Image (cartoon, helix red, strand yellow):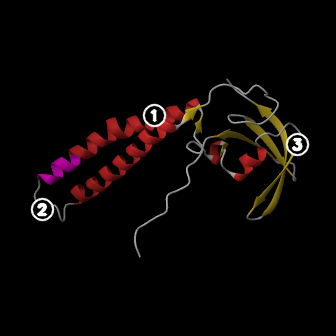
Amino acid sequence: MGRYRPPRQRGSRYITPEGEQALRDELHQLWKVERPVVTNTVHEAAKNGDRSENGDYIYGKRRLREIDSRVRFLNKRLDEVEVVSAKPADTSKVFFGAWVTLEDKDGQEKCYRVVGPDEFDLACGKLSMDSPLARAVIGKCLDDEIRVNSPSGEQLYYVTGIRYQA
């Protein structure tokens, strides 16, 4: 069995200004802060001689590969993303960047922001626009009903709030 993995489907190109800044900060952290430290550690470990049993050397080289791989990904991704900073013309509907409040059938409300796939974090209320829930909610107005198929069955939500922040 080979190591071939089919290419992943690309996520949407859209990103918020905050998301773009987070990616740029991560790139700076990896390239300007972490990589020089790891490179120095590997250099010092290589001076010790036998590299086959040198943990600092082996794990340092592995970490360098991880950093270089992530830096390549971030550079490519930052070149292709499109930053969306303007509010849509019709703010009564849910579009990219909107904070949307959803109420489930039990009356529990949850607030999500529709963001790009590079910045989603459900713990912070950031919902990827490529997710089934976000696809179902985009284009909806206040008091619209949303049905989403999930592994636990069909979920029913109502849009109770839409807001855009500058």
Seen in the image, is 166 located left or right of residue 6? Answer: right
Secondary structure beneath disc 2? loop
- Residue 152 visible to the viewer: yes
Name the residue that disc number 2 marks. 50
Q: Residue at x 63, y 47 (%)?
A: 123
Seen in the image, is 105 located left or right of residue 63? Answer: right
Q: What amino acid type is highlighted by mark number 3? A: Asp
In the image, residue 79 lies in the stretch drawn in magenta: no
Seen in the image, is 12 located left or right of residue 93? Answer: left
Q: Residue at x 88, y 42 (%)?
A: 144
Percent position (x, y) of residue 101? 79, 40
Q: Quadrant of the C terminus?
A: top right
Q: Residues within 10 Å of mark 1 (few under 14, many from 20)?
A: some
The disc, 2 or 1, on the residue closer to the chain's N-terminal end is 1
Q: Residue at x 66, y 25 (%)?
A: 86
Give the magenta range: 41-47
